[in-house]
Amino acid sequence: MSTYHYVACDLGAESGRVVLGTLSDGRVAIEEIHRFPTGAISIGGSLRWDLLRSFDELKTGLRKVAARGLPIASVSTDSWGVDYVFLHGREPMLGLPYHYRDARLDGSMEKAFAKVPADKIFAESGIQFMQLNTLYQLLTDLEQRPKLLKLVEKFLTIGDYFNYLFSGAKKVEVSLASTTQLYDPRKRKWSRELIKSFGLPAKIFPEIVPSGAKLGPLLPEIASETGLQGVEVVASCSHDTGAAVAAVPGEGDDWAYLSSGTWSLLGIESEKPIITDKSRAYNFTNEVGYDHTIRFLKNIIGLWVVQECRRAWANAGQEYSYDQLTKLADEAPPLKRFINPAAARFAKPGGMPEKIAGYCRETGQTPPESVGATVRCVLESLALLYDRTLREIATVTGQKIARLHIVGGGSKNTLLNQLSANATQVPVHTGTVEATAIGNILIQALGLGHLPSLAAARDVVRQSFPVSIHRPQDAGVWQDAKERFGRLTLAT
């Protein structure tokens, strides 16, 4: 078998990376070449993304790759969903893009529902209702920045924006298009019904391309600046979760996945959208993956809560690594208190330890008395939320889940993995920590014809990375915890 080299530019909410991938003899190997921070910046009373700085960092990573002297076949960028960049002519962007947690979106869903009923929005898009969705961001632009919106020629989602900077192709890959709540997964195109009903300018919606689409070679100036010549730009799965799910080493149809990081994306893979009254009632989403498979999942707040606690403690002069926080949590007494991670207060930045303590007091629980107890409360609550979500999936689809594959950076948290196995009472399989970069790379290989199918790509993952299995424990103790958690979340 030939050897091929690819570059994945993987952008997350906290950090970005340039990763070199090598496919050879039925195995894939990856190496992180460059890492840099991507977090939000506060400016003018708003939260924004400094994407031009990230672009400069990506080019630094590409120069480091070029220094290896390897024949690079292609490069592709993936990112989080929903946020976007406005384009006009040769301008690199019209204003710094807003962060999905910016306060400007407060109340935006309710305004949207006054124009178009929620059931109609869901029937068209099949997407979970979250005020951070692109739909509500664009409607807020229409209300607050109408003059700017008139100048816009196209908008591009984040991963696709970087692919555009590399290739010059103003196109959106389908996995990111599907996160906007303006894509129709049954007709496989933008929902003209929703675009028209909300009065959004149709001209700004770019062409949608499938996962693995070739966008063209690196622009001459990028090739010259980085030293990478003859490299194709591919739209892999531009949505990081779409890329991560493509790298889940699942077999059969009785497994679920959890892409664990700042967000927890928990769901199953389906051949068709599941757009029903039940799926809307449980607020599930139908996002698109490779080959237009459907990621039927729920976006759950994830390790963001721990990240915000860590940030607050650091600001107070208490510096902890994530490993230290996990160790302290492991040493804390188990199952003493819970929060509802889905409560709105935990989605906002700032003061997270105080928010957790306040929630506990409001719900008749003793607030955590230490850093370890606070982190353990969060991790146990997440595990219980995972269990509830899996049971909701079974209710909606009738599918019984026999194992849960946890991938992504959060899969390194062995305590959370074991807590998840205990809460769900199904085996938890881990091992594909770098699932997003791996999926990005393998979809590039699929797009270039170096692999024949998604099944073959997943077989490559199984051959390349060992799997650890966390077996369920303490079923009786956790059943009691589930009942307490159920009463708690129903009450708030």
Image (tube, rainbow, N blue to C red):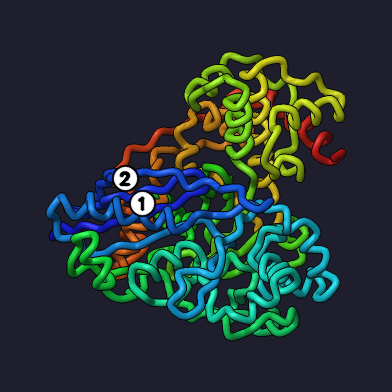
Tell me, yes or no, whether the two marked residues, 1 and 2, touch with CB atoms within 8 Å: yes
- Report the Cα–Cα distance between label 1 and label 2: 8 Å
Instruction: Tell whether 214 sits left or right of 430.
Output: left
Q: Position of residue 61 (x, y in %)?
A: 29, 51
Numbered label attached to residue 34: 2
The quarter in which the C terminus is drawn is top right
Q: Position of residue 373 (x, y in %)?
A: 66, 19
- Vertical order, 244 against 87 (above or below): above
Which marked residue is nearer to the observer: mark 1 or mark 2? 1
Query: Would you name the residue on which mark 1 appears?
Result: 57
Sequence-wise, the earlier of marks 1 and 2 is 2
Q: Secondary structure at mark 1?
A: helix
Question: Quadrant of the rendered structure where residue 432 is?
Answer: top left
Instruction: Give the amino acid type for the residue marked by disc 2 in the picture.
Output: His
The quarter in which the N terminus is drawn is bottom left
Instruction: Tell whether 243 sits left or right of 69.
Output: right
Residue at 83 percent across and 35 percent down: it is 487
Q: Position of residue 312 (x, y in %)?
A: 63, 29
Q: Secondary structure at mark 2?
A: strand
Residue at 40 percent across and 71 percent down: it is 164
Pick whichever, 193 or 124, lies toward us: 193
Mark 2 surroundings within 10 Å by alpha-carbon count, few (fewer than 14), some (14 through 19), many (20 or more) = many
- Vertical order, 141 against 5 (above or below): below
Camera sees residue 271: no
Q: Position of residue 460 (x, y in %)?
A: 29, 52
